[in-house]
Each structure stands twice: as structure tokens, then as C-alpha cells.
Image (spheres, grey):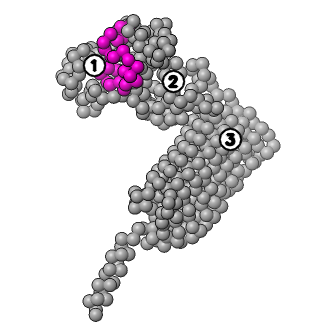
Amino acid sequence: MLKKILSSLLAIALCAAILPPAQAAGTSWKYDKGVLILGGTGTADYSNRFSWQINFGSKITELQIGPGVTGVAGDAFKELTALKSVTLPDTFKVLSGYGFRGCTALAQVDLGKGLEKLDSGAFKGCTALKSITVPGGVDRPGDNAFEGCTSLVSARLEEGCGWVSKMMFHGCISLRSVELPSDLIFIGDDAFKDCWALTDIYYNGTRAQWENVRKDDTGVELAAATIHCLDAVLPGTPKPPQSGTQSILFDDVLSNYWGYNPIMTCARNGLVMGIRQPDANGVGSFGPEQAVTLGQMLVVITTLVCPEKRQNIPSHWAKGSYAAALETGIIQQGDFPDTIAALDTPLNRQDMAYIAANAARYKGWKLAERPEVAQEIRDFHVVSADRQQAVIQCYSSGILAGYGDKRFGPKDTMTRAQMTVVVCRLAGW
């Protein structure tokens, strides 16, 4: 009998041990036809992102949180890319860091009335989110809370929310207006960086109160906004003119992206365009991680070195650049098939070097040429014979470097962002 009792107790203990952390804490979850339902009481700890995320993460379109759940620890809902809307109950108090980061379909959020803690990066990268109200119980939202919410148009911080934290709205390129409480005491560094569309801040205090707010954000975006105080309207300082004929904005190339400078340099010099035309706010998309094609490279390089030779040939948008490259010797007949399909084919690294070196020769730009490079590059023997000199020149000149392990990767394709780096180095920018 004792043996049976001990066996039963052991079985119970084992069952308890394998329960998800959320259930052990007094909360529970279930999934039903696209809906994730959280119930029970207390704070649910989903920091280990267990089975429901692994098994149902890409299918969850709706989240229902019961009134007994007071918080969620960890990045519980990170990258639920099908999730469309969220409503937190008024009893919900704590949303931990990166809780909804990367929920790219999340367009509507109601944070409830009882929220007290909104940690760093909670909605970072929620690119479909259009508006947000932060309840007054959250006196200090976490840094980067809404960073990269590229569709966010308006934001409101209720009375009691005294901080606009560091980089809180960084990269919210569609953000036009913000409402701030009268008891605001601080605006953090780069809070509105890259908020290019920001035109109006509605402050629920007086001008004197506004002037007493500590502002670590010294960027042109905040400075350019009109401040609407209760007793005065403070016009913003016009933004300094950008190079080029117009402002160029890409929703997938923010200032913290590694290729921001070369991409924007090429764009403002008229060498590259986006893959999506600008919207009403003047914001398009560049597609920096997409493979660059032969046609795209020829358009860029001929625009740089021989714009007068380019023609408009209706059969393909890059056909005129192909003809200009042939005429100037940037490419030779037979280097690439004279077909539309070839123009739309991703370009590899040895062909990129070949085109760049020939463009330099056409312009009379001297490239370094160290013969010992052939021994330094581990896979030089893979480089096609008619591309070897170009690879040596571009490698020697730092225009197209190899990998950290001394490989060049001649047959590897390149991205659109990498192309702009090559072009900027070639042009000496």
C-alpha cells in the first residue's frame, strides 16, 4: 500500500515538474483556431518561449488575456507575425522587454488603464501599428519602446507619463503628431530620431512648463516640429536642406542600419532608386538585402561614369544602360547574354569587380594592383580567368574586399546595400 502511495506521489510530482512555467505560476494558456487565450491569475512567465510559440506562433492572429493575468514576463509574443490586434485588461500591470517585438501585422493595440510598466523594446519593429496611447500609470516607458514602428502616425502619452524615453520613437518615419502630458519632465536622447514626418507636438502645459522640460534629444526632427502649448504656439526650426534635389526616405533603411550612409549617398546623388515608389509622406522602400541584379548595377554604374551615353530603350528599364556599358567598354559583347532574363539575374562578386574595374578604366581612375593578392586570396583559383585582373585591382584598392577568412567568394551574389558600398568606394565618396 505504501509503495502505491509513493508511486502516486512521484507521478504527481513528475507531472507538476513538466508543467509550463506559466501554469506553475497560476496562469494558463490555450490555443483555439488562431486565438491564443491566457487565463488564471498572476504574472505569466513565457521567457523560455515554449510550446505554444513553437507550435502555433505563425498561426496566432488574436490574443485574449483574462482579467486575472497581471503581467507577462519575457518576450512572450515576440515575432508573432500573424497577430493583428491586442487588448490588455485593465488589471494588466507589467509588459516586459521586447514583449511584442517584431509583430509585423499588429495594427491595433489597447494597453488598458492599469498598465504600470512598459519595458524596453516592447513594440519594437511592429511595422503595421498606426497609433498608440500610453496610459498615465507608466511614468517611465522603456527605451526603444516603439522603435521602428514605421506605420505609426500618432502617439499619445496620458497625464502621469512623465518620460519620453531614449529612442522611444526612433525610426517612426510616418509619425506626424504626438500628444504629451503637462507633467512631462524628460525627453530622452534620440527619442524622435528619424521621425522625418513629425510636424506637430501637442503639449498639455504652458510655454513656461515646456521650456522647463529637460530635452536630451537635440535632433533636427524634434526641433522642426511645431509645439502647441496651452498658451502659445512655438514654430519649429526648418530642417537643413539635404543634398540632391529632394528628400529621399526609405522605410527599410533607418539611420542605425549598417548601410545607411552609402545607400543615402548613392540615392542623393541620383544613382539608386527604391523598389517601391514613395507614398503620400514621401517614403518608399529600398530593399537593401535583396540581391542586386546585372541590370541594376549597370544602371548605377553608367549613371555614375557615363550618364550622357544612357538611352531609353522600351524593352527593359536597364536596356539603355546595357547599351551604354557596351559602347564605353564597361562590358564587352559576350560577357553577359543580351537578354532581358540576364539583366534580371543576380550579379556575383567577380562580375561586380569586373564592371567596377572597367568603369574606373573608362574614367581614367587609377586602381592599385598588387600581384601578391593572387596568393593572399584563398579561393583565387576559383575566379574566372577573364575576371582575375579586375578582382586583383578591386581587392588591392579596397573597393571590393574579401571575407574575414581570406576568401573572395567570386560566385557569391551581392545585395543592393553592398552594391552601394562598392560604388561609393569606387567614386571616392
Q: Which residue is mark 3?
A: 177
Label drawn at residue 391:
1
> Is 349 included in the stretch rendered in magenta?
yes
The residue located at (48%, 63%) in the rendering is 31
Q: Residues within 10 Å of mark 3 (few under 14, many from 20)?
A: some
Vertical placement of 313 versus 18: above or below? above
Q: Which is in the foreground here, disc 1 or disc 2?
A: 2
**Element under label 1?**
helix
- CA gap between label 3 and label 1 equals 51 Å
Label drawn at residue 273:
2
Tell me which label, 3 or 2, sits earlier in the chain: 3
Percent position of residue 236, x then y: 70, 33
Q: Quadrant of residue 331?
A: top left
Looking at the rendering, the stretch of residues picked out in magenta corresponds to 328-353
Q: Outermost residue toward the bottom? A: 1
Tell me which label, 1 or 2, sits earlier in the chain: 2
Q: Residues within 10 Å of mark 1 (few under 14, many from 20)?
A: many
Q: Looking at the image, can residue 42 be seen?
A: no
The residue located at (49%, 7%) in the rendering is 308
Tell me which label, 3 or 1, sits earlier in the chain: 3
The quadrant of the rendering that contains the N terminus is bottom left
- Are dots 1 and 2 in contact, CB under 8 Å? no
